[in-house]
Image (cartoon, rainbow, N blue to C red):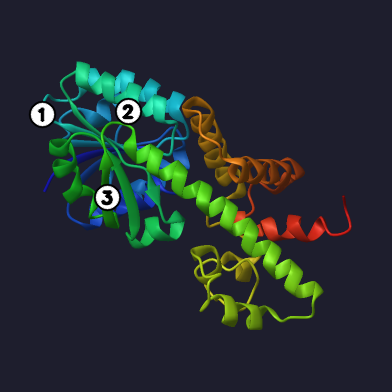
């Protein structure tokens, strides 16, 4: 089994590191937050004094950090301490340009690298059922896959450096748009006197079928595991959806792509977040949709 350094032990990183421990790997972990370090220790990881000390002697380094600037800062610090021939994997969702810069930093140090953002939320992190979207060279992907398989059930090589991040932001733009569409449909159904279950039974087996409906239905009842049945506790917080939609818009602007629905979805989630709902699950956007009735 490998020695794996894991840096970033938040709501996603903590359970992911715990699954690597369960798989028999030696995990040396670090996070700036004491509570996260304590949880990782109780999950069986060794706790390092710093990110640099965590990576010394590691075969694989995994980072799970908030944004591109954090990734570049941490990678700049730790790469000189990583053994040649080791592998570094970035699992956060960050902008494509920062991902490419991170790959370049690793290449200068002779360290193989993969950007591998995830989909599946905290539930997927705990259950080791995440989807990993990977960018990087074939050899690096082949080395990363056995490690990622201990934390997820679907590992996809999307292309070269930054391709994993590109796939993630495109996917989440679809998700953000579709959740608003599903929420609008249920809001309309309520006004027309149609029950939640009736709409679900029709749309879930018809052309309106989508993940936002069948796996994450934004109203209580039809999908018992959806956050709608738990007062919209995340899950995947609305602030994180706004982050991903903003990354998608930044990428669209840089690439010269037209994404009018993506832009409108970003604006809707920005309003929702500004009203103090950033910690609500993103499916709670139905509350905002309902509040728009009668407004122009």
* 96 displayed left or right of 27: right
Which is nearer the eye, 88 or 191?
Answer: 191
Badge 2 is on which residue? Answer: 51
* 2 displayed left or right of 264: left
Question: Distance between the Cα atoms at labels 2 and 3?
Answer: 28 Å
Residue at 40% x, 35% y is 31
Residue 196 percent across, percent down from the top left: 67, 78
Mark on residue 156?
A: 3
Residue 33 percent across, percent down from the top left: 47, 36
Badge 1 is on which residue? Answer: 85
Which is nearer the eye, 50 or 23?
Answer: 23
Nearer to us: label 1 or label 3: 3
* 292 displayed left or right of 15: right
| N-term-proximal mark, 1 vs 3 | 1
Nearer to us: label 1 or label 2: 1
Question: Badge 2 local density, few (<14 within 10 Å), some, or many (20+)?
Answer: many
| N-term-proximal mark, 1 vs 2 | 2
């Amino acid at each position: 089994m490998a020695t794996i350094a894991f840096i970033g032990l938040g709501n996603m990183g903590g359970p992911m590191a715990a699954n690597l421990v369960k798989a028999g790997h030696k995990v040396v972990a670090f996070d700036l937050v004491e509570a996260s370090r304590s949880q990782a220790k109780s999950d069986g990881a060794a706790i390092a004094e710093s990110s640099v000390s965590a990576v010394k002697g590691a075969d694989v380094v995994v980072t799970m950090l908030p944004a591109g600037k954090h990734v570049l800062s941490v990678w700049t610090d730790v790469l000189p301490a990583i053994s040649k021939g080791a592998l570094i994997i970035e699992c956060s969702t960050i902008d494509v340009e920062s991902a490419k810069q991170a790959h370049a930093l690793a290449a200068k140090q002779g360290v193989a690298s993969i950007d591998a953002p995830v989909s599946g939320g905290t539930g997927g992190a705990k259950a080791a059922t995440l989807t990993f979207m990977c960018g990087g060279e074939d050899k690096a992907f082949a080395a990363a896959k056995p490690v990622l398989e201990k934390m997820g059930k679907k590992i996809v090589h999307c292309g070269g450096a930054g391709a994993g991040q590109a796939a993630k932001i495109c996917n989440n733009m679809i998700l953000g748009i579709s959740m608003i569409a599903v929420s609008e449909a249920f809001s309309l159904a309520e006004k027309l006197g149609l029950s939640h279950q009736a709409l679900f039974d029709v749309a879930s087996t018809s052309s309106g079928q989508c993940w936002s409906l069948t796996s994450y239905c934004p109203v209580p009842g039809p999908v018992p595991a959806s956050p709608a049945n738990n007062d919209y506790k995340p899950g995947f917080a609305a602030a994180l959806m706004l982050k991903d939609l903003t990354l998608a818009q930044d990428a669209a602007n840089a690439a010269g792509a037209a994404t009018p629905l993506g832009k409108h979805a970003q604006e809707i989630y920005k309003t929702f977040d500004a009203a103090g709902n950033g910690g609500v699950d993103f499916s709670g956007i139905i509350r905002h949709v309902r509040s728009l009735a009668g407004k122009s």
